[in-house]
Image (tube, coloured by chain):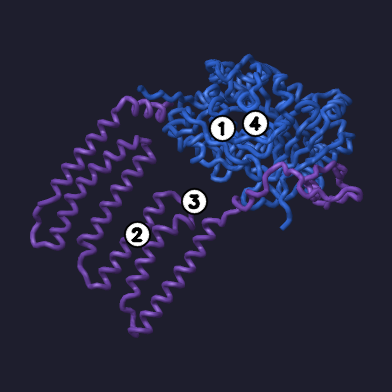
Amino acid sequence: MAYCVKCGVKLEDSEKKCPLCQTVVYHPDLPPAVNAKTPFPKEHLAEVKKMSMRFGSMTATLIILLLCVLTLICDYSINSKIVWSDIAVSSVGLAYCVIFIPLIFPRKKALTYLTVDFLALLLFQWYIEHTTDGAWFLGFALPATCSAMLIIYTAMLIKKFTKSSGFFIAAVIFILSGLNCILIEFLINKTFMDKVKFIWSYYPLITFIVIGVIMFLCDRNKRLKEKLKKKFFI
Amino acid sequence: MAEHKRRWLRLDNAAKLYPAVRTKNWCNVFRISITLNERIDPEVLQAALNVTIKRFPSVAMRLCRGFFWYYLEEITTAPLVTPDLPYPCGKMTSQDMRQCAFRVLYYENRIAAEFFHSLTDGNGGLIFLKTLAAEYLTQKEHVEIEPKNGVFDRLEAPNDKELEDSFLKYDGHTATSRREETAYKITGTREKDDFHSVITGIVDLSDALSAAKKYGVSLTAYLVSVMIFSIMEIQDTEIPDKKKQKPVKVLIPVNLRNYFDSASMRNFVLYITPGIDARTGEFSFEEIVKNIYYQMKLQLTEKQMQARITANVKAEKNKFLKVLPLFVKNIGIKAVFSMTGEKKSCITMSNLGAVTLPKEMKKFAERFDFTLGVQATGSNNCGILSYKDKLYINMIRNIKESELERLFFTNLVKFGIAVTVESNQKDEV
């Protein structure tokens, strides 16, 4: 066992330098300890040093960006104009918003990510309509996407602010989804058909409402009630 | 077969703070470890843990979120024992705590238990670890260990008194003010990857005791004085102008079981913050020791402690605060904690005291260590305990600079106490 020449403390054999002043250990009479037992494992250091998610995502972003540019160049060099690559690039952009934004900005809440995804989806739909000369965005895609998002927002808000059980939230989602089917059929008829006529939406509506009511009843289960008691004690 | 109804507990008065103030990268974790005279067998350790958790229903818990408060819920299966990491008291994520709010780790001859502070305090953690080690030795070495000296009988049913919130029991009628002056803070370059450096100073207990005896003070008062002396040296170098300096204070957790009758395995600690106002002039070490000794004497009385318990419980019982949703409470607690909390002291020095074991266990146990996690905003912390004839001082930090440790241990050497140090420092690449 050596002493630190600067600090005067004894150093365990595992110390190659003084942990207090970083002076390298030197003992003229003792050979340096090679396999001395360390107080903490060192071999796990590599496992702990993972590549940061943010760094990984930024690298992936650059690679995706490069691929998009290459796609556009290929399309343009073959057709002398942009024919198909814009659809590919916008699809990649949508997928990017959904997958990579939560990884690059991990501190944001789920509500923020969802809003970004929602806006990206709307933009993507509008762009597709615009490039294909369609007339379905305002009449169908926008209200249908908004209603689906409203259901998700409602569920998230209930979860965030009411601490309701999973059964209750699931019940709300089922019932709202049933009602949404009516809206979807209405929008399809209004946008793509000549007259509004409800044919199929009653079936999912009834099914979803039945499932929702079952969920509500489950929510009244005694064991689950005990769980709620734990959640809501003052 | 009817499903086992899981026990759940409201957090005790001290425990309420910790879940609210934790951040993504920090939570209040402490660690106690025992080093045996042979390599740990993880399978036997897992089997021992499976038995031990049944005896400690207030420790074998996970942290859950209610609408108004957090609560603890019993876990039915023990967490898996895992190999130790390069540094102690690593972060425990919210997801980890929802599974189980403590972990058991092993490395070479050592078993370590790391607890989220809402579960228990150092006293409870030590009893848990000693009982776990006793069960491990019983299974591995087939020794019969008498349940005494802080080792519980694993087959005995848990006592209701072990689950009580003793703060509520000793809530008095007069509350004391909690207002304190902001203390000096040590700063430095943060380690990458949340690495925590630990330097352990090993000292002969008899040397440390005789050094304290020379000044007629307790060992804790002596070590706190050395720490204050060392921090004052750092402050003098950093801020040479005395008028601009801040008080140097050390937070000392106090085991209230020494003042009030309690068998609780949950948190039952308060703290005192003796210190020196560096602005008032130069202090010799003798002056600091005397000053700290009298401050501790004044603050460490049953009546003072009860008045402080009352102040803390008063906030918890406030009807308006009670009905606030948890997320609002969390914002409030976080704000108060960041404005006051750790700002009132430079470092925490927690002394668990002398660890004793039943005689059947002594020959197997070579060493104990107690390590506090780093503070949320501060850089250093210090956990102390003694076992057999040695005193183990574990200093942890999340900054690169080891100036405080250097001054503290070299001051001990200057005062005639031989110190052996070991660390988890990284090898230079």
Q: Amino acid at mark 2?
A: Leu
Crowding near pointer 1: few (<14 within 10 Å), some, many (20+)? some
- Chain identifier, blue in the render: B
User: Quick one: SS at disc 2?
Assistant: helix
Q: Is residue B366 left or right of residue B145?
A: right
Residue drawn at x 58%, y 42% is B91
Residue B360 placement: quadrant: top right
User: Quick one: SS at disc 1?
Assistant: helix
Q: Read off the residue under disc 1.
A: B46
Residue B359 placement: quadrant: top right
Q: Which mark is residue A119?
A: 2
Above-or-below relation of B192 to A216: below
Pointer 2 with pointer 1, Cβ within 8 A:
no
Q: Is residue A229 left or right of residue B212?
A: left
Pointer 2 with pointer 3, Cβ within 8 A:
no
Chain A, colour shown: purple
Marks 4, 2: nearer the viewer: 2
Q: Which mark is residue B179?
A: 4
Please give the chain letter of the residue carrying mark 2: A
Q: Label 1, label 3: how many angstroms apart (C-alpha)?
A: 36 Å
Is tag 1's residue or tag 4's residue first in the polypeptide sequence? 1
Crowding near pointer 3: few (<14 within 10 Å), some, many (20+)? few
